[in-house]
Amino acid sequence: MALLGRLLPLALALALGPAATPASPAKSPYQLVLQHSRLRGRQHGPNVCAVQKVIGTNKKYFTNCKQWYQRKICGKSTVISYECCPGYEKVPGEKGCPAALPLSNLYETLGVVGATTTQLYTDRTEKLRPEMEGPGSFTIFAPSNEAWASLPAEVLDSLVSNVNIELLNALRYHMVDRRVLTDELKHGMALTSMYQNSNIQIHHYPNGIVTVNCARLLKADHHATNGVVHLIDKVISTISNNIQQIIEIEDTFETLRAAVAASGLNTLLEGDGQYTLLAPTNEAFEKIPAETLNRILGDPEALRDLLNNHILKSAMCAEAIVAGLSLETLEGTTLEVGCSGDTLTINGKPIISNKDVLATNGVIHFIDELLIPDSAKTLFELAAESDVSTAVDLFRQAGLGTHLSGTERLTLLAPMNSVFKDGTPPIDARTKNLLLNHMIKDQLASKYLYHGQILETLGGKKLRVFVYRNSLCIENSCIAAHDKRGRYGTLFTMDRVLTPPVGTVMDVLKGDSRFSMLVAAIQSAGLTEALNREGVYTVFAPTNEAFQALPPGELNKLLGNAKELANILKYHVGDEILVSGGIGALVRLKSLQGDKLEVSSKNNMVNVNKEPVTEVDIMATNGVVHVISSVLQPPANRPQERGDELADSALDIFKQASAFSRATQSSVKLAPVYQRLLERMKH
């Protein structure tokens, strides 16, 4: 029966499957980072944790793998030290920290964890020490000795001068009337303190850092007989105002206050939730041009986007940022929030002048520069931050600036600066017309463009969209960077000046004296009509010199045989439009003749069948022309067909042999099959 009693639970567990066995609770981020510190310190003995200490400070961190290898916190170098993990102590003569700390009451535990100043102030009050030594279950977030020492003198004097009211209330605000361990400290939760039931804000970040009213937990989960002690790095104070109320009372937020009221965001900022407001000061607003500021303040949609770009979707205390973080704003953009020493940075700039002003619904950091999102900018403003300043200067010189700063919905195709390394064209009627054809009559987004789409320009031209595996092109020009979508216009950064198509392929060839022999050959072969009609062709056009380089007999023979001439000319025409920006490493392009052309690109040089293309992307309404200096020869049809047939036959025989081998597992029986293969190959 005893054996049956042991086997029955096991049998039930196996029968019911994994769901029936109790799962171990998931570790919190703090527990995971503590576990990592344990693993890094285990070679020094049991219960030893590796701690990273910022050089020149008393700041210590349990860190994750990434920070361990970087050996940096907020850009500052660290040294590794090894100390007893929370809850353990050394034993003389033994390695590591083998002994669990003996449990004592909360008051005595304060001394054990190094919060002796908190212990001293507790002792000064008449009521608190007996409570900490008596029965009950409490949690205290105990400020470290350094935290008390860093308090402003006037604040500390006001506390210690009235120990039974001010100091007692301050200490009670650090306490909760139940045991709360780190696995219960959830991000965004509020704990009810023992001072007038005021809330304490908890944030538990993915990097393992836990904050209490933006004070960082230094050492957590120190058990006592009547509760638990968490050591924190600041003395915390009560929170009474929401974000909107703080904006209302701060003198430095006068412009922000007016902007929030005009946008209607005050409802959000005084409601429930947990947000981070990167609050621009009056100085921040004064730094941008008055014209830009007035335009945004007078445009409700742009104003709302501007303010939403200053609001993060969750509360982010400064102590939680030990490396770069990508944080999403309410506007939908991403801000890189990082740190440099004790300074917080936004997108790499140290623009935060005051941090961790706590509100009941989040935290405020004061910033002295405005974070204007793309969605609130004109095309001019978008271009000012992009690699297209030369092109924008051309638009301005051509008198087209009003299109880039007004409320007209359009998309600007702006060639990047490197396109003009050899100089810019003179501003004349032709250039102005070309620039008009770089503006599309709609505000587009590249992710919605599709192959074959037709776009209309302000210059009256129709442009085609070509979608390739690794590029997205509009006529001969391909998009070189992510588009920027502004208030009314979108900016596409293009890799070259766009050439609108003019005439058919035959029109292009007839209009260029380099191709007079090719035009004559096309006419002799009867292909003129085909290259004049609507279609999608890529023509590798041999110049007159290319034809003249052929042996005289071969050229005469070719021109005297219309069928053979048509066959060779069709081999120069692909059956789709392939501009140079869409080639990539290698593209096999099917020709009208039937065989494939191998088109490759390397170091900005295009080749077809390993022959150089001397000029690319002459655009036509029904295709594109690339100039070559040789006549391409198609593979000989019959030998190619014979070779393909033999290869196919060999493949069939090998397939038969393989199948036969698997069926019989006999190598002897394969001899006749291989014999057949040899006979076929001889012939």
Image (cartoon, rainbow, N blue to C red):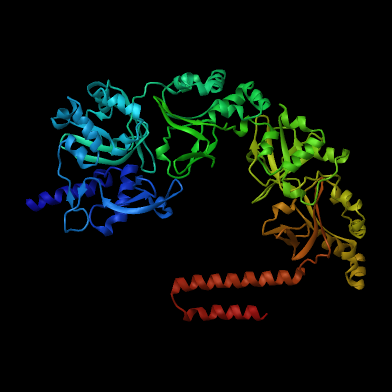
Residue 669 appears in view: yes
In this view, which residue lies farthest toward the left? Answer: 1
Q: Residue at horizontal 70%, vertical 55%?
A: 583
**Position of 386 compared to 434: left or right?**
left
* Residue 490 screen position, x and y as percent: 68, 35
**Position of 40 compared to 517: left or right?**
left
**Figure check: 328 above or below 552:** above
Q: Nearer the viewer, residue 18 or 237?
A: 237
Q: Residue at horizontal 23%, vertical 52%?
A: 47
Q: Nearer the viewer, residue 568 or 270?
A: 270
* Residue 552 screen position, x and y as percent: 92, 72
Q: Nearer the viewer, residue 202 or 453?
A: 202
**Position of 324 compared to 495: left or right?**
left
Picture quarter containing residue 522?
bottom right
**Figure check: 260 above or below 620:** above
* Residue 524 screen position, x and y as percent: 92, 58
Residue 179 appears in view: no
Tell how many labels.
0
Picture quarter containing residue 220?
top left
* Residue 558 screen position, x and y as percent: 89, 67
